[in-house]
Amino acid sequence: METWADLGEADRLSLDEIFSSQIFPVLMPLAVDPAHPFPYISGLSLNLSIRVRNPKSGKEEFARLKVPTNLPRFIQLPDDASGRLRYIPLEDLISNHLGDLFPGMEIQEYGYFRVTRDADFELVDESDDLLAAVEDELRRRASGGMARSAPISGACSMGTSRSTAFARSGVSWCERAGTWPAARWPG
């Protein structure tokens, strides 16, 4: 397993091409601000939280980017004559191309995270239709409350403090606790 920092120029150029042709077209960053509600985050999905700054206005913005599940999680690197198979995590490749997703903006910081949703399952014994009751519970569970959010190592602060508020929504990174504060997470 390789990281972007470990790669030479030839590998980076090859991955730039892969990113531009195969990955960039399926990415969809979502802004979080008063005009855009906090996006729904599906359970166990891998996400990037990104704080950007407009260099002209100085205004900081927050965005969330879901790592696509329709792409391989690990991208194979070209053969380097070592005889080893080498891979880079998809999220590492994406995070090193954030400038392509936010042209004209300065990337202040980013981090990777997953959300675990409440998966409790309760059925009432008096249900007339057991199948309908199970279907209702499964629908409820898919949008259940957040049980925890897990930051994933490898996040980059880009020279700023992770404890800085990411957005006006009140969401902040809690480095000491190693988690996002569930009580304050929207949705």
Image (spheres, grey):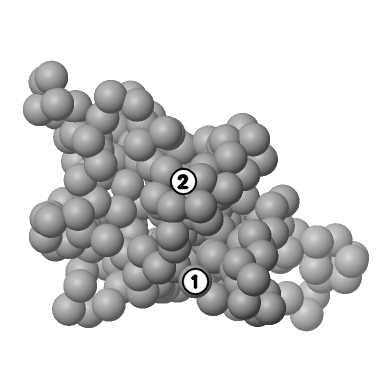
Rounded to the nearest whole Å, what is the CA distance between mark 2 and mark 1?
22 Å
Place of residue 187 in the rendered image (x, y in percent of width and height, measured from the top left): 42, 51
Q: Is residue 112 above or below residue 169?
A: below
Place of residue 49 in the rendered image (x, y in percent of width and height, measured from the top left): 35, 51
Label 2: element kind: strand
Residue at the image point whose x is 40% and y is 50% from the top = 96
Quadrant of residue 111 within the rendered picture: bottom left
Q: Mark 2 points at which residue?
A: 65
Residue at the image point whose x is 42% and y is 34% from the top = 101
Q: In this view, does 120 lie above or below 167?
A: below
Q: Name the residue under label 1.
A: 2
Q: Which of 169 and 173 is in front in this view?
A: 173
Q: Given contact means CB atoms under 8 Å apart, are the residues at marks 2 and 1 in contact?
A: no
Q: Does the image show residue 43?
A: no
Instruction: Farthest residue to the top: give it.
Output: 56
Name the residue type under label 1.
Glu
Q: Does the image show residue 71?
A: yes
Horizontal relation, residue 74 to residue 132: left or right: left
Q: In this view, does 177 lie above or below 15?
A: below
Place of residue 91 in the rendered image (x, y in percent of width and height, measured from the top left): 49, 58
Residue at the image point whose x is 20% and y is 72% from the top = 175
Quadrant of residue 51 within the rendered picture: top left
Nearest to the eye among marks 2 and 1: give it: 1
Q: Residues within 10 Å of mark 2 (few under 14, many from 20)?
A: many
Q: Which of 78 and 186 is in front in this view?
A: 78
Tag 1 or tag 2, which sits nearer the N-term? 1
Place of residue 12 in the rendered image (x, y in percent of width and height, measured from the top left): 48, 51
